[in-house]
Amino acid sequence: MSPSDHDVPAALAEGGLARVARAATRAWLAAALLLGLAGCATGPDAHPRDPLEPFNRGVYRFNEAVDDAVLKPVAEGYQAAVPQPVRTGVANFFGNLRDLWSAVNAALQARPQPAAENFMRFSVNTVLGLGGVLDIASEMGLARTTLDFGHTLGRWGVPSGPYLVLPLLGPSTVRDTVALLADRRGDPVAQGGEDVATRNALQALRIVQQRATLLRAGELLDQAALDKYGFTRDAYLARRQRQIEEAQGRNGDE
């Protein structure tokens, strides 16, 4: 790793522990509040990590209705109208921006290897890949490790809290919901300057692009899952737990 690579994680981590502590405190308070509210919603058959299931299922149905009416048709139109190379370039562009935030979180997790790799990915693709439209870094063998602040909180032992379905945003937990505040601050699109029209257009494009990538998975889920809510919940919780365990297990090797 070059000296500049060492400087970047150090600069990113400065003040990071204080943010982690504040976010962790908020997560605990939110978890306590939600668990209190969930007292009347639980029963003998409640999922142990989903005490808010009646509420969550209601939000899930709302999200499904919005998706069926708006997001899915727009994503299908986008996929049909935009050539594959252009869609790939759009996905690369937003993935490149995400790599920078992943580098920040890897640094806050004291994981130098993914911090350096993600920062180098961002640097290479931004400079040589036309602002990230071309994924030159993958061709060079630089691995991508996608991380967010909820992952960082989990890395340092903050419990996930109850499962939570957010309006429009979908599956989450109390910890990951609190972490969205920091994730938004680290999102170059959301913080994209004073040009509100451009910022909103980029955010809309990112939503459509992300939904388009899930069209095939959504079809398979419709065909395979008797209870799509339960399947989605279990898959999300298992994936997040696997990410946390990977971070904790790999830390000593990096």
Image (cartoon, rainbow, N blue to C red):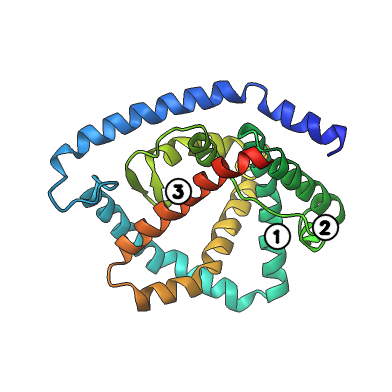
Which three-letter amino acid code belongs to the residue tagged 1? Answer: Asn
Front-most of residues 30 and 251: 251
| Secondary structure of residue under mark 1 | helix
| Secondary structure of residue under mark 3 | helix
- Farthest residue, direction front: 253
Tell which circle, 1 or 2, labels the residue nearer the N-terminal end.
1
Classify residue 142 as left or right of residue 39.
right
Query: Which quadrant holds residue 27?
Result: top left
- Residue 231, image x and y in percent? 34, 63
Q: Nearer the viewer, mark 3 or mark 2?
A: 3
- Residue 81, image x and y in percent? 62, 77
State how far apart marks 1 and 2 are (Cα).
9 Å
On the image, numbered disc 3 is attached to which residue? 241
Front-most of residues 216 and 71: 216
Quadrant that contains the N terminus: top right
The numbered dot on residue 92 is 1
Q: Are marks 1 and 3 in contact (CB under 8 Å)?
A: no
| Secondary structure of residue under mark 2 | loop
- Residue 210, image x and y in percent? 55, 61
Q: Are marks 3 and 2 in contact (CB under 8 Å)?
A: no
Query: Which quadrant holds residue 142?
Result: bottom right
The numbered dot on residue 129 is 2
Which three-letter amino acid code belongs to the residue tagged 3? Answer: Gln
Q: Are marks 1 and 2 in contact (CB under 8 Å)?
A: yes
